[in-house]
Amino acid sequence: MSDQIKYVLDESRIPKFWYNIAADLPKPPPPVLHPGTHQPIGPADLAPLFPTALIMQEVSTERQIEIPEPVRDVYRQWRPSPLYRARRLEKALETPAKIYYKYEGVSPAGSHKPNTAVAQAFYNKEAGVKKLTTETGAGQWGSALAFAGSVFGLEVKVFMVRVSYNQKPYRRALMETYGATCVPSPSNETQSGKSILAQRADHPGSLGIAISEAVEVAAQNEDTKYSLGSVLNHVLTHQTVIGQEAMAQLDMAGDYPDIIVGCTGGGSNFAGIAFPFIGAQLRGGRKVRVVAVEPSACPSLTRGKYAFDFGDTAHLTPLVKMHTLGSTFTPPGFHAGGLRYHGMAPMVSHLKELGLIEAVAYTQMKCFEAGVQFARTEGIVPAPEAIHAVLGAIDEALRCREEGKSKTILFNLSGHGHFDMQAYIEYFAGNLKDLAYDENELAMALAGLPSVKEAA
Ligand SMILES: *Cc1c(COP(=O)(O)O)cnc(C)c1O
């Protein structure tokens, strides 16, 4: 038999808790610092931006955080998401390895992002918030939050990186269909946007600039809070429904992963699939090799510096210690829009420093080749972000073939590529190239990192 096998859990198996890896760490991560004083911040410093429940999750060291029943109710629409055994891909690769993938493209917005968007919208609604602001690059996060806002009756305003706003009208239309407002960034609606436009009227925008704009609006309006789709601890924690379900599904299959692969933009879907397994290992369970895959054109984990940096361009956010390319770094225009962030989740960076995860970087052409092979064997067209994880899994499977070893590989297929077919069109037309970032620009961006005196 060479066909796919699908492992389905019934809805009673939707996790009742999110898993917080902070409870199991051998060493706590560095503190988050105030951008002005460089002193550790407390929960009160974040209150203008986030509701208390999310701030408490951000700093929590409790292993399990209960998922509110109204959130599980919304999850029920697409969770538990399916786990597939990629038998047709295994056969095409002639590998003795077993390849499993968890498919998060079954959510309404087509990616893993609603797992946290729904939770964030719920807690904001509970706290009496009327309006959420956020940024989006390729549009996946904006559409996830727009969906969640429509479910809980919150207004959503999305600052969308201007190049994507112009290039991705369907994502924009999706956000508007859910009832959100979408503004190209940099915009004239904020001081941060205006000051960038004053320097360059046709500025293409960046995630760092869009974050500055969304944060500014939230900080200045009483009824408005800010929502972030990756990077922060509470976002990573919400995504752990992915790994917990995968563990139960692999159990049905009588299997356990030797290798886990995920793509990393800000680190949330990677954390979602990997943290429950890393946690089990830290509590004395089986050891897993965990591989983060990032684009060579925006290689924060493999080429960035582990240093304190700002999350945004206008330097409104706190300082966090992470692998960073510098907050002014603008990557070249490769197609995985969701992997273009200059930094990495501090928790993912911390695990890298502790030697609990590895990282590799791949160029875009090889990723698209892997994405097409995946579509032609497994039938699902992966998002341009997810093809990095696909290639990571294929590389591991090919290594198993060379070494004649049968290992179990699990990867997260973070979303489908139905809104990104232009990227595939350009790949087939031969218009895509492997883009290198500008070494001088990286050196400049790194030279501009804030200097922070660290306590020994
Ligand atoms: C946003 C996105 C990513 C990257 O974000 P992470 O926080 O690193 O997960 C990856 N895949 C898809 C489909 C996305 O939408």
Image (spheres, rainbow, N blue to C red):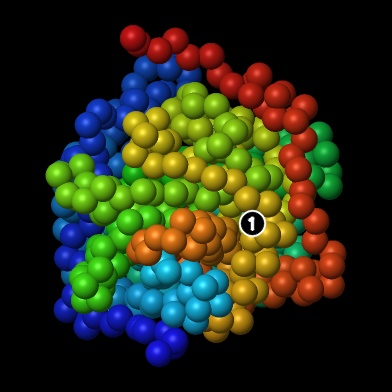
The N terminus sits in image quarter: bottom left
The C terminus sits in image quarter: top left
Measured along the vertical axis of the image, is residue 307 above or below residue 245? above
Measured along the vertical axis of the image, is residue 16 above or below residue 28? below
- In x, y percent, where is residue 393? 49, 61
Q: Residue at x 56, y 19 (%)?
A: 450
Q: Is mark 1 within 8 Å of ligand 1?
A: no
- In x, y percent, where is residue 21? 25, 44
438 with respect to 369 (left or right): right
**Mark 1 burial class by Cα count in 10 Å: few <14, some 14-19, many 20+:** many
353 with respect to 123 (left or right): right
Measured along the vertical axis of the image, is residue 328 above or below residue 147? above
109 with respect to 193 (left or right): left
Give the camera-side residue of 407 and 149.
Answer: 407
36 with respect to 58 (left or right): right
- Residue 354, by quadrant, is top left
Number of marks in picture:
1
- In x, y percent, where is residue 43? 28, 34
Q: Secondary structure at mark 1?
A: helix
Residue at which label 1 appears: 337
Residue type at the position of mark 1: Gly
Measured along the vertical axis of the image, is residue 219 above or below residue 116? above
Q: Residue at x 31, y 50 (%)?
A: 288
Give the camera-side residue of 40 and 18.
Answer: 18
Give the camera-side residue of 61 and 276.
Answer: 276
Q: Residue at x 24, y 80 (%)?
A: 9
- Residue 370, by quadrant, is bottom right
